[in-house]
Image (cartoon, rainbow, N blue to C red):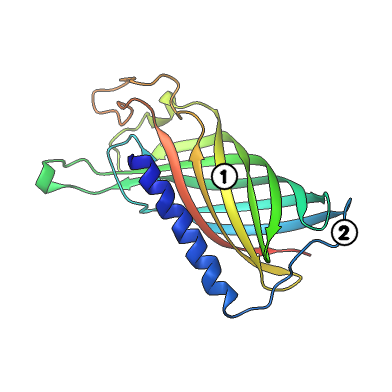
Amino acid sequence: MREVTRMKKKIGFLTILIALGQTSFSQKAEFNGANQFYGELGTHVLFSQLDGDGASGYNKFGLQLQALVGYTLNNQEALEFSLGFSERGSRKGIDPENSDFRIFHIRHQWLETGVYYARYFEGILAHAGLRGTYLIAAEESEGFDPNIESGMRKIGALAELGLRYPLNENWSVSANASYSVFSLLKNDNSTFLPNSLYRSAGLFSNNIGIGIIFTP
């Protein structure tokens, strides 16, 4: 039930963002025919958390950079492939009310490649797909768990939903939501160190991204 509520909040947030954009700009409403390639460069600010680390709130600010190539199927639909880099993770301060004095700042850097199905809906380009990830580095910068990377899988995947609102032929505003397909841990319920953050039944990356897209 908790995850359903979070997903509803994400979808509502993305819908509101795009609706606000519609009041101010005229947009490109479709692709320029079938069997054509197009390219994009994009950057997103990420608001992220890790389900399973005991913290809450999208208070870890990260960054996502990517290059994307699309292939149009017709005026409305396309297949897209991306390659990029991102930093995601989690943050937590002390919680005296619950006698929890753990402080941590988890930073994960990933190399990413994605495949998506994209379609125009009334001037909004929506996409859905999978983003494969390869862990470049992981650290906990407050010293709570110096061996945090040892418990993590190198290869992962995120399910992603996104919306792009074209402002003109070259620029779009973008929003996306992503969630881990499977746990980031090598072994769930692992206890590598007495103070390890990896003690939950799974660890899942949960993110919202807001950004800008350039189409040459």
Q: Nearer the viewer, residue 95 or 78?
A: 78
Report x, y in % for residue 17.
51, 66
Q: Residue furthest front?
A: 122
Q: Can residue 183 be seen in this view?
A: yes
Rendered location of residue 161, percent (x, y): 57, 48
Dot 2 or dot 1, earlier in sequence: 2
> Does residue 61 appear in the picture of this structure?
no
Residue in the picture at 77% in, 50% down: 78
Q: Residues within 10 Å of mark 1 (few under 14, many from 20)?
A: many
Taking depth in this image into account, of 35 and 155 the one nearest to the observer is 35
Left or right: residue 162 compared with residue 96 = right
Q: Nearer the viewer, residue 158 or 11?
A: 11
In the picture, the quarter occupied by the N terminus is top left
- Disc 2 to disc 1, how far (Cα)? 26 Å
Circle 2: element type: loop
The residue under label 1 is 160
Among the 4 quarters of the image, the one containing residue 175 = bottom right
The x, y position of residue 114, in whole percent, is 66, 41
On residue 91, the disc is: none
Q: What element carries label 1?
A: strand
| Nearer the camera: disc 2 or disc 1 | 2
In the image, what residue type sits under mark 2? Gly
Quadrant in the picture for the C terminus = bottom right
On the image, the x and y values in percent for residue 204 come to 42, 35
Query: Mark 1 belongs to which amino acid?
Result: Glu
* Disc ID at residue 33: 2
How many numbered dots are placed on residues in this image?
2
Circles 2, 1 touching at the beta carbon (< 8 Å): no
Please name the residue shown 48% across and 66% down the image: 16
